[in-house]
Amino acid sequence: MQAWYLAHQEQIQYWLDWAIYTDAFRELSALMYVIFAVGLFALGAEYHAAMIRKDRTIGQFPEGYFTMLAVQLLPLTITGFVLRDPYIIGTRLGTLMVVLIVYAMVTSANGTFNTPRYRLWMTFWLAVAILGPMIWFESETLRTFVRDWEKWIAWSSVAVMLLFVIKGQRAVARTLFQHYMRGNYSIKRFSLQVVRFFGFALQAVHYWLVPTTAKPLLGLDPIFLQGALGTVGVTMVLIGSMFGFIWGSRARQQKREEARAAAPA
């Protein structure tokens, strides 16, 4: 492997320089976030439609997953505004918007939203979306506070991502493992995790090669660390899913036999 690298070092460096110059890593990562958000919305819409049909067989998202996902996005979004990084701002705000919409769809008990809870929920987030930018640009005190605490806000995004990997991604890994162990074939949620892997991995590669001006944590750029931790977490989910798919082959075979037996002659 080392001999191959030494033989192709110039070509590898050329393509890395090209990717950095064209911002290819972040652009591809942003595309992965778009695909993830669309897929997440599709899963939420499918679950919502099943709720209206009173179909309880469709899989549910792990408990607390959306809360952890939203909390994980907030510190890095604020850091993006401080660093004036359009990639961080765009990917996190877009994902957060979809997370909030899907959360509303999957938490409705009967598929409707005409309750005080949802009206208050929508009022709060619309106030944040509309009044937040106004307050940010008009309040020098707020901007100064965020700049002064930039280091801790950036570091908190790493800490929250670590918590999300331990709690949120572990719940996703367990849910997908059990999904395949029961003999299910659907790979929609697994596919979303593959997309999420590339989103995090490409982010980590870019900020490893081109660190931000944020204060380093453990000698490393916190935006890189956030992406690297996300990559590790999603890798755990993918590995667990593959083991579940392999070990669930017997259950899938049994389902096929039951389906053939139930089919009319």
Image (tube, rainbow, N blue to C red):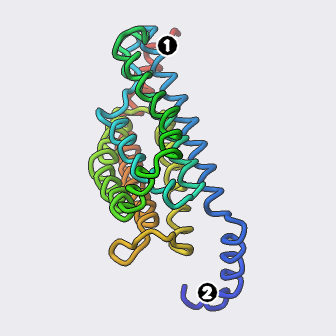
Residue 249 x/y as whole percent: 40, 40
The residues tagged by marks 1 and 2 sit, at their Cα atoms, a distance apart of 56 Å
- Residue occupying image coordinates x 39% and y 23%: 121
**Pointer 1 or 2: first along the chain:** 2
Left or right, 88 with reference to 215: right
- Residue occupying image coordinates x 53% and y 10%: 265
Task: Relative to 246, say whether 264 is above or below.
Answer: above
Which numbered marker is on residue 4? 2
Q: Nearer the viewer, mark 1 or mark 2?
A: 2
Residue 254 found in image quarter: top left
Residue nearer the viewer, 214 or 98 = 214
Which numbered marker is on residue 12? none
Residue nearer the viewer, 138 or 88 = 138
Q: Mark 1 points at which residue?
A: 263
Amino acid on which disc 1 is placed? Ala
- Residue occupying image coordinates x 59% and y 49%: 32
